[in-house]
Image (spheres, rainbow, N blue to C red):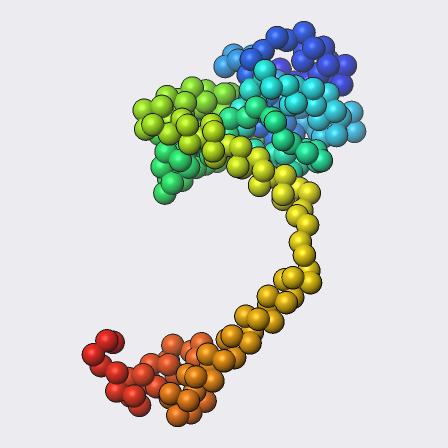
C-alpha cells in the first residue's frame, strides 16, 4: 500500500501494536513491513520527505519493545540523521549473514536465494521508473522481514546468537554513533607520537643503509631484492 500523506502514515503507525518492523530505505523512498503480508511504501516527494518520515517513525525507532529489522543498519541510521542511536533494538540481516558466512555475497537477492525465499529479481528492476521503484521497496521490506526468521534460526544453529546479540550488534551501534558524531582526539598527543614514529623509522633506515653499504628505497621490493640477494648474497633465507 502506498502512503501519500503524513497523516496516513501517523494513523497506520499509531494504531499498530507490533513487536517488530522491517524498514528498507533508499534514496528515492522507504518501505516498511509490519508482517510478511502488511507492507507499506513511500516515494519521497514534496508531500512526504525523508525528514517527515523519520519524525513520525522516531518513537518506534527508540522503542526497545519494537525490534527494527534492517539491512545495513549503520547506513540506515546515517541517512536518518539522528544524533544518537544508542539503546535501539535492531536486527541487521546483513550483519547476521556476515557472522554466519563471512565470505558470502550479502546482497538481498543472493540471500533470498540462499534461504529459499521467493522474490522477484530485484536486479532486473528499473530504479528510475516509479512503478519499479514501488515494486522494489515492497519486495525489499518483505524480504528483510522474512530473512530475520531464517537468520535467527541459522545463528542459533551455528551457536552464534550470543555473539550476534550481545557483542556484534551493540558494538556496531557504537561504531555507527562514532561515524555519525565523530570522536574526540588529542591532537597534541597524536603529533607527539607521530614524531616518535618518524624518528624511529629514520633510525631504522640509517641502520639498514649502514648494513647495505648504500642508500636505496627500502619501500621498493625490487631494490630491496637487489640489495639482499645480489649484493649481500642472502640465499639461506630467501
Asked which quadrant contains residue 74, the reply is top right
Answer whether residue 108 is visible to the viewer in this image. no
Establish if 222 lies above or below 171. Answer: below
Question: Image check: 190 left or right of 168?
Answer: right
Q: Position of residue 69 (x, y in %)?
A: 53, 24
Q: Is residue 164 above or below residue 36?
A: below
Q: Residue at x 66, y 22 (%)?
A: 62
Rendering quarter of residue 151: top left
**Rendered residue at 55%/76% (across/down):** 199
Where's residue 11, x and y in %? Answer: 72, 10
For residue 228, side relative to residue 105 (left or right): left
Could you tell me residue 97's position as x and y percent? 41, 33
Residue 113 position in % (x across, y down): 37, 29
In the image, residue 11 sits, relative to residue 105, either above or below, namely above
Quadrant location of the C terminus?
bottom left
Q: Among all residues in the image, which is located at the extreme bottom?
A: 213
User: What residue is rendered at 68% in x and 50% in y?
Assistant: 184
Q: The N terminus appears in which quarter of the rendering?
A: top right
Residue at the outermost right position:
46
Give the residue drawn at x 50%, y 20%.
145
* 168 vs 67, nearest the viewer: 168
Taking 46 as reference, is 96 left or right?
A: left
Q: Can residue 189 be seen in the rendering of this structure?
A: yes
The front one of 151 and 125 is 151
Q: How many marks?
A: 0
Amino acid at each position: 500500500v502506498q502512503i501519500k500523506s503524513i497523516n496516513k502514515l501517523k494513523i497506520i503507525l499509531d494504531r499498530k501494536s507490533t513487536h517488530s518492523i522491517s524498514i528498507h530505505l533508499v534514496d528515492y523512498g522507504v518501505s516498511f513491513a509490519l508482517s510478511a503480508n502488511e507492507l507499506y511504501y513511500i516515494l519521497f516527494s514534496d508531500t512526504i520527505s525523508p525528514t517527515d518520515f523519520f519524525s513520525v517513525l522516531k518513537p518506534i525507532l527508540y522503542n526497545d519493545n519494537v525490534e527494527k529489522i534492517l539491512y545495513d543498519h549503520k547506513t540506515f541510521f546515517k541517512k536518518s540523521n539522528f544524533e544518537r542511536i544508542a539503546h535501539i533494538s535492531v536486527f541487521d540481516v546483513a550483519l547476521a549473514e556476515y557472522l554466519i558466512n563471512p565470505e558470502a555475497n550479502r546482497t538481498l537477492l543472493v540471500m533470498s536465494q540462499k534461504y529459499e525465499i521467493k522474490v522477484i529479481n530485484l536486479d532486473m528492476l528499473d530504479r528510475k521508473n516509479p512503478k519499479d521503484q514501488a515494486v522494489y521497496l515492497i519486495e525489499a521490506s518483505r524480504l528483510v522481514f522474512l530473512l530475520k526468521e531464517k537468520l535467527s534460526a541459522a545463528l542459533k544453529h551455528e551457536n552464534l546468537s550470543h555473539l550476534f546479540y550481545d557483542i556484534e550488534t551493540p558494538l556496531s551501534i557504537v561504531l555507527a554513533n562514532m561515524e555519525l558524531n565523530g570522536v574526540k582526539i588529542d591532537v597534541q598527543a597524536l603529533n607527539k607520537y607521530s614524531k616518535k614514529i618518524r624518528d624511529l623509522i629514520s633510525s631504522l633506515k640509517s641502520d639498514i643503509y649502514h648494513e647495505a653499504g648504500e642508500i636505496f628505497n627500502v619501500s621498493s621490493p625490487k631494490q630491496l631484492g637487489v640489495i639482499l640477494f645480489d649484493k649481500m648474497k642472502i640465499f639461506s633465507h630467501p
